Amino acid sequence: MKPLLTVEDLRVTFPTRTGDVQAVRGVSFALGRERLGIVGESGSGKSQTGRAIMGLTPSHAKISARKLAFGDRNLLTMPARERRDLRGKQVAMILQDPKYSLNPVMTIGRQIVETLKTHEKISTSAAKARALAMLEAVQISDPKRVFSLYPHEVSGGMGQRAMIAMMLVCGPELLIADEPTSALDVTVQLEVLDILDKLVADRGMGLIFISHDLRLVSSFCDRVIVMYAGQIVEELPAANLADAQHPYTRGLLNCLPTIGSDRHPLPVLDRRPEWAL
Amino acid sequence: MTSALSIRDMVVTYDEFAALDHVNFDIGTGESFGIVGESGSGKSTLLRAVSGLASFDQGTLSVNGRSYSGRKRDKEFYRTVQMVFQDPYGSLHPRQTVDRLLLEPLVIHGFTDIETRINRALDEVGLGSGFRFRYSHQLSGGQRQRIAIARALILEPKILLLDEPTSALDASIQAEILNLLEQARRDRNLTFVMVSHDLGVISHMCERLAVMKTGKVVETVPRKALENREFSAEYTRQLLVASEGFRRG
């Protein structure tokens, strides 16, 4: 089967006054229609990997790769115009906090309709019907009301559902979710994940789930990539998380406090310089 | 057990909205007490009302036998009670060095052995005197939270209020900060009141915990009850399920 996305030796470099900073240093993976988790701490390059695939890297940064392809289409040489058509239509991204990622001066409904009208030849009334159906699909009980609300008028969980609706309304083939539930309450997190899980499964999309939460990712994804200092240190099937070999992965798993375990003090990560080589 | 912190029928209202609705707590000296709940449950409001950052409209608050009301607190109160906030990026003055940040409470409370106290406070949180003349933007999130803890501990308080002290930090850094807090509590026989949305963290740190929802205390249970699932409220069960991660159903 041909992979949906191929990434080979991806590097993202930020020039600074004190020299180049490599945020991503040679990341390679192939993604089919599956759920792939990327885990790492802040600064590990997990978000920059997602942004590079999406084409949202800041313009002063340098991206290089042996191959970065969506299907047969080379993302590295693609003109900006084609990239814009792709973005939102075939590749979509859910960001962390709906408070910042939704447009504050447009109603939720208008934002979804805007996405549809940008990518499809569709009448306003048809777009509106599609948007309402999508809001219903993300289990918003009163889609008509939410359609005409502004982002500040809804809760975080509701905002994130609206975000998911907006991203999925054009039926993308690849969805990148960058910490989609970190800004939400624990009880709401599961509802949102549940919705995301069902939609991704029903539509047979490829999903890249970026998070710092190793346990969450492993319970949600088929395969997990663990990143440290811009590199992949370990890749393993989510079910075999307990057999993780790399000391960083094991350390991450170990340092979480859990109910019922009485470990005082908690084991801490002993970072070794050779991990970052 | 004498109670270090006693709250009776505390009510905090913002206009018509009751952020805290007749809340009662008794926290013993040397105890570590946890509060869990989702956003809007009133858990942070409670800490802010205790510390005097928000005023409470009804009820009584007594700390080591002295009672306080409204927002007014005397110096003695702040010698006894200190607070560590959630966001290490927002709780340190961006244009003050670590030295200046730690100096301020000492000057306000008229301490004289400033040099030794600042050096000791930095050592205690594992940073060393090399950090003394840095600005907070030169520190990582974990280091900033260590400075915030040093600032709270430098007055040798008896009670520490912790408002989600690790929720803005990576899992590996969280473990370090939790260990540091436990060490400090053991060394100084501190009383902790810790707010978090993470049941794992609370059950690791606290002997007893209260579950809050919409400004009310749903129930108060010992840690053991959480492990053995001996609790009565449906909401506590929901929180527990949520803390166990995603399950495909």
Image (cartoon, coloured by chain):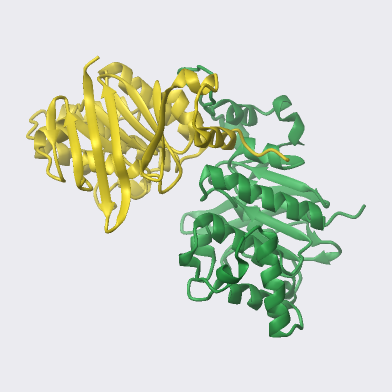
Chain colours: A green, B yellow
For the residue pair A150 and B108, the one nearer the viewer reads as A150
Query: Which residue lies most toward the bottom here?
Result: A123
Toward the viewer: A44 or B163? Answer: B163
Q: Is residue A53 above or below residue B199?
A: below
Quadrant where the image shows the C terminus of chain A: top right
**Residue B131 visible to the viewer:** no
Instruction: Tally the numbered discs.
Output: 0
Rendered residue at 34%/50% (across/down): B90
Residue B47 left/right relative to A108: left
At 77% across and 41% down in the image, what residue appears? A222
Residue drawn at the location 14% of the way across and 41% of the way down: B69
Q: Is residue B107 left or right of residue A254?
A: left
Which residue: 55% across, 61% down? A159
Quadrant position of residue B193: top left
Residue A79 to residue B229: above or below? below
- Where residue A2 appears, as percent x and y from the top left, is 90, 55
Q: Residue furthest top?
A: B1
Whether residue A237 is visible, yes or no, is: yes
Residue A214 in the image: state x and y as whole percent.
63, 37
